[in-house]
């Protein structure tokens, strides 16, 4: 049965995990030292999935005769009102502490976005982004508002689960 529940941001939570391999180990070091398995104080979480669909037009035809699937890209942003260096370390890895002499491994991790309304237990929606790497970090220090950091990320692939 399809999930037909309506959710708000108050129903959401974000957890981080790590894949196997060197990049996952580097991310696990950051997640452990900053106790970031569950990410808090976030807002404006966005995930965009795009597919480079290419239309094929025949000579003499105004409408496409075929649509061919192309590359799929997954990217997004997370705004966070808790600035402590963890997200920056997930972007820079070893380079966050000092300038490494050579190339270094950038941490990779998984993000699970979970939506579950307390009024309807057992009905949930989860999106898991796999092989995530942070590709941008922004720090905002406004005059009359909360200090925020924002990270941009890209993911290798995603999985979706609806439970009811």
Image (cartoon, rainbow, N blue to C red):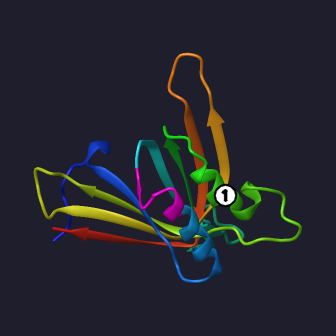
Give residue 73's position: percent from left, percent from top: 59, 66
Give above or below for 83 relative to 27. Answer: above
Establish if 102 lies above or below 47. Answer: below
* 152 with respect to 81 (left or right): right
* Viewer-proximal residue among 124 and 74: 124
Can the viewer see residue 63?
no
Q: Is residue 36 part of the magenta span, yes or no?
A: yes
Magenta extent = 31-39
Residue ID at (64%, 80%): 22
Question: In which quarter of the view is residue 127 placed?
Answer: bottom left
| Other-residue count near label 1 (Cα within 10 Å), few / some / many at <14 / 14–19 / ≥20 | many
Residue marked by disc 1: 91
Q: In front: 70, or 33? A: 33
Picture quarter with the N terminus? bottom left
Q: Is residue 77 left or right of residue 127?
A: right
Q: Is residue 33 above or below residue 142?
A: below
Does residue 19 appear to the left or right of 40 in the view shown?
right
Residue 67 horizontal/vertical position (percent): 57, 72
Which corner quadrant of the image does residue 121 belong to?
Answer: bottom left
Furthest-front residue in this view: 33
Residue farthest top in this picture: 144
Tell me the residue at 32%/44% (across/down). Answer: 9
For the C terminus, the image quarter is: bottom left
Quarter-of-image position of residue 102: bottom right
Q: Which secondary structure, mark 1?
A: helix
User: At which x and y percent is residue 142?
Assistant: 60, 22
Is residue 122 on the magenta stretch? no
Percent coordinates x, y for residue 161 in the rendering: 30, 71
């Amino acid at each position: 049965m399809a999930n037909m529940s309506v959710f708000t941001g108050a129903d959401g939570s974000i957890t981080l995990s790590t894949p196997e391999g060197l990049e996952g180990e580097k991310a696990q070091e950051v997640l452990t030292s900053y106790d970031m398995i569950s990410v808090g104080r976030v807002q404006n979480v966005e995930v965009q999935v795009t597919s480079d669909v290419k239309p094929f037009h025949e000579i003499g035809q105004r409408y496409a005769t075929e649509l061919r699937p192309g590359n799929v890209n997954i990217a997004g942003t997370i705004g966070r009102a808790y600035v402590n260096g963890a997200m920056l370390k997930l972007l820079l890895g070893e380079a966050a502490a000092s300038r490494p002499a050579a190339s270094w491994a950038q941490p990779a991790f998984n993000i699970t976005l979970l939506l579950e309304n307390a009024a309807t237990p057992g009905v949930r929606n989860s999106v898991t982004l796999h092989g995530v790497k942070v590709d941008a970090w922004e720090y905002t220090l406004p005059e009359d508002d909360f200090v925020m950091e924002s990270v941009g990320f890209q993911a290798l692939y995603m999985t979706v689960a609806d439970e009811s």
